[in-house]
Image (cartoon, rainbow, N blue to C red):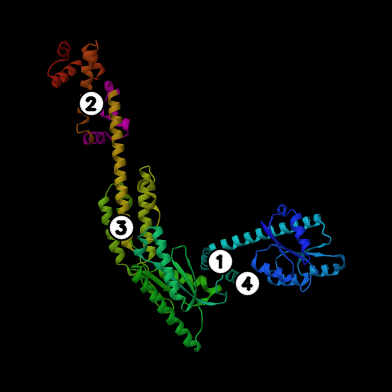
């Protein structure tokens, strides 16, 4: 709903208009009246007015002067001018000052209605656009951190922008950088203490480290940061102000500042968050042309060294000895991890893990790629044994254990592998036991339905296992031998037939699979101390 201000020195004109015009039809809920230009300005200072209708001819301050003052303070406020024929030229002049319409006296109600309808629609459309713009700006401000993060990731990954396009983006994102600026890059990796936590906790730690870093860097540098695809923290720095020093002294002073701040960052994270970080300080370069190379050099240096519990600091501005990469041969020694899992040598597998940990510790260069190599070999072996047992590894141990996560130390990696091994062993043994009981059930069913033509080989063929293994498995799970079980089933059936059928002894012997009834009689007597006939007669 809207508010309108009527201005005319002839009070009866606006008093009559207030009463006679259907303002509600045009979504106008409140009418203000002023009988002079000064009174109108006073009302505008105190009230939220959406439309002004004013007469042009008034003493002291006429309508044109009133509109000029209104537009100076509120240029978008719609003003409608009332004029007589004699003032037509003045009315045309008023349109140059932003008057939306002028109406002739005596006032035509229909023309006023049409004018108000178009003016109100224009106001409402302006409000909608303003709301849409505000929503768009709020959304932009909300997503600005992620937009900055994405742009820096694109640059370090090698995406190319023209100088003008890059500068336009930097300005649009309110970043105090230009394409030709000299910058340095700081790469930060959170070490083992942090990566042992859940993903959500790790993100909180990354947020805390970022805040500490920005607070330190911002004392001397403009800072722009992101998280890269390896979950490292990347900080791009530009000197915010230059000291009045000779060029060479200024370079040394900047290097000292940055080294000192980087070491302070390393110390503060260890002190306040109780965990280590590794920090790589790149060489200087131009933002647009050198940022990719600066990032790749820092990334290579970071991956060639694994931090201990507290991490380390390395400046690429200083010369450092390139490491010589060696292979971790113990990963590929026989028996392979696949073989150890196939044969159920769980403890030997664990012993191999400890040997890997010891072998890794003796390498002169303990790199992240070595940790990746160990994880890939172990994970492939776990997948192999799971699939061989007709199951997905994620179904056996849980999705959270299968997802590849970055390990910051070999001990963290071997702890994960031992946990995986224990969970896998428990599930496979449970699965194996279920399968063994299913085999026993199949054997018993087969025995009960094939007594007349039963042999160990026929039972083994039925369950697709070796006869020796069938005998061993049955004895292990049932506590009696398979032959003892078969005899028990046959004798139970013999007793039933002797009690509840008219079959002769030789017929019962044939049903039980005995080729010779005399042998059946002997077995029965050995079992019950009497012949089948004696039992029936009793």
The structure residue drawn at horizontal position 62% and vertical position 72%, both measured from the top left corner, is: 164
Residue 435 visible from this viewpoint:
yes
Contact (CB < 8 A) between labels 4 and 1? Answer: no
**Residue at which label 1 appears:** 159
Nearest-to-viewer mark from 4 and 1: 4
- What segment is highlighted magenta in the picture? 449-476
Q: Position of residue 253 (x, y in %)?
A: 45, 84
Split into 4 quadrants, where in the image is the N terminus?
bottom right
457 within the magenta span: yes
Sequence-wise, the earlier of marks 4 and 1 is 1
Sequence-wise, the earlier of marks 1 and 2 is 1
Residue lying at the far front of the rendered structure: 12
Question: Would you say the magenta stretch is mainly helix, strand or loop?
Answer: helix
Residue 340 visible from this viewpoint:
no
What is the crowding at mark 3: few (fewer than 14 residues within 10 Å), some, or many (at least 20)?
few
Sequence-wise, the earlier of marks 2 and 3 is 3
Q: Which of 286 and 502 is in front in this view?
A: 286
Name the mark on residue 164.
4
Sequence-wise, the earlier of marks 1 and 3 is 1
Nearest-to-viewer mark from 4 and 2: 4
Sequence-wise, the earlier of marks 3 and 4 is 4
Q: Position of residue 454 (x, y in %)?
A: 27, 24
Contact (CB < 8 A) between labels 1 and 3? Answer: no
- Give the Cα distance between marks 2 and 3: 49 Å
Nearest-to-viewer mark from 3 and 4: 4
Q: Nearer the viewer, residue 352 or 58?
A: 58
Left-right relation of 167 to 225: right
Q: Position of residue 284 (x, y in %)?
A: 49, 78
Picture quarter containing residue 49?
bottom right
- Give the Cα distance between marks 1 and 3: 39 Å
């Amino acid at each position: 709903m809207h508010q309108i201000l009527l201005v005319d020195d002839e009070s009866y004109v606006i008093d009559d208009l207030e009463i006679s015009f259907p303002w509600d039809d045009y979504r106008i809920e409140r009418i203000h009246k002023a009988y002079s230009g000064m009174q109108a300005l006073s009302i505008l200072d105190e009230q939220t007015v959406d439309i002004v209708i004013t007469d042009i001819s008034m003493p002291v301050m006429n309508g044109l002067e009133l509109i000029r003052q209104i537009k100076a303070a509120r240029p978008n406020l719609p003003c409608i001018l009332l004029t007589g024929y004699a003032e037509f030229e003045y009315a045309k002049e008023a349109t140059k000052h932003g008057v939306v319409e002028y109406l002739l006296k005596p006032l035509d109600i229909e023309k006023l209605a049409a004018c108000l309808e178009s003016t109100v629609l224009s106001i409402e459309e302006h409000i909608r656009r303003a709301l849409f713009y505000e929503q768009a700006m709020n959304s932009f401000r909300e997503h600005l951190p992620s937009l900055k993060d994405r742009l820096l990731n694109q640059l370090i990954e090698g995406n190319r922008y023209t100088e003008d396009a890059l500068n336009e983006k930097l300005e649009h994102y309110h970043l105090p950088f230009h394409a030709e600026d000299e910058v340095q890059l700081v790469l930060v990796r959170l070490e083992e203490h942090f990566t042992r936590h859940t993903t959500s906790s790790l993100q909180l730690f990354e947020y805390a480290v970022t805040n500490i870093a920005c607070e330190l860097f911002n004392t001397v540098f403009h800072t722009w940061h992101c998280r890269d695809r390896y979950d490292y923290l990347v900080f791009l720095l530009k000197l915010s102000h230059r000291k009045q020093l000779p060029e060479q002294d200024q370079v040394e002073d900047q290097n000292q500042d940055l080294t000192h701040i980087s070491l302070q960052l390393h110390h503060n994270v260890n002190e306040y968050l109780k965990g280590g970080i590794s920090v790589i300080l790149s060489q200087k370069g131009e933002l647009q042309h050198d940022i990719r190379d600066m990032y790749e050099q820092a990334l290579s240096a970071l991956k060639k060294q694994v931090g201990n519990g507290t991490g380390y600091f390395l400046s690429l501005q200083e010369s450092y000895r390139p490491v010589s990469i060696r292979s971790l041969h113990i990963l590929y020694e026989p028996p392979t991890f696949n073989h150890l899992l196939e044969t159920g040598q769980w403890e030997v597998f664990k012993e191999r893990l400890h040997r890997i940990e010891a072998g890794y510790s003796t390498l002169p260069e303990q790199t992240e790629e070595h940790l990746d190599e160990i994880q890939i070999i172990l994970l492939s072996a776990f997948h192999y044994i799971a699939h061989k047992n007709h199951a997905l590894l994620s179904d056996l141990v849980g999705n959270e254990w299968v997802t590849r996560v970055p390990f910051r130390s070999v001990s963290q990696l071997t702890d994960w592998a031992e946990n995986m091994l224990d969970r896998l062993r428990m599930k496979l043994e449970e699965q194996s036991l279920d399968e063994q009981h299913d085999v026993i059930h199949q054997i018993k069913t087969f025995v009960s339905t094939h007594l007349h033509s039963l042999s160990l080989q026929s039972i083994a063929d039925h369950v697709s296992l070796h006869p020796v293994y069938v005998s061993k498995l049955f004895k292990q799970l049932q506590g009696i031998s398979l032959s003892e079980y078969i005899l028990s089933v046959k004798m139970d059936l013999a007793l039933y037939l002797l009690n509840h059928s008219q079959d002769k002894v030789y017929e019962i012997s044939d049903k039980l699979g005995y080729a010779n009834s005399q042998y059946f009689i002997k077995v029965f007597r050995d079992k019950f101390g009497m012949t089948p006939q004696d039992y029936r007669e009793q």
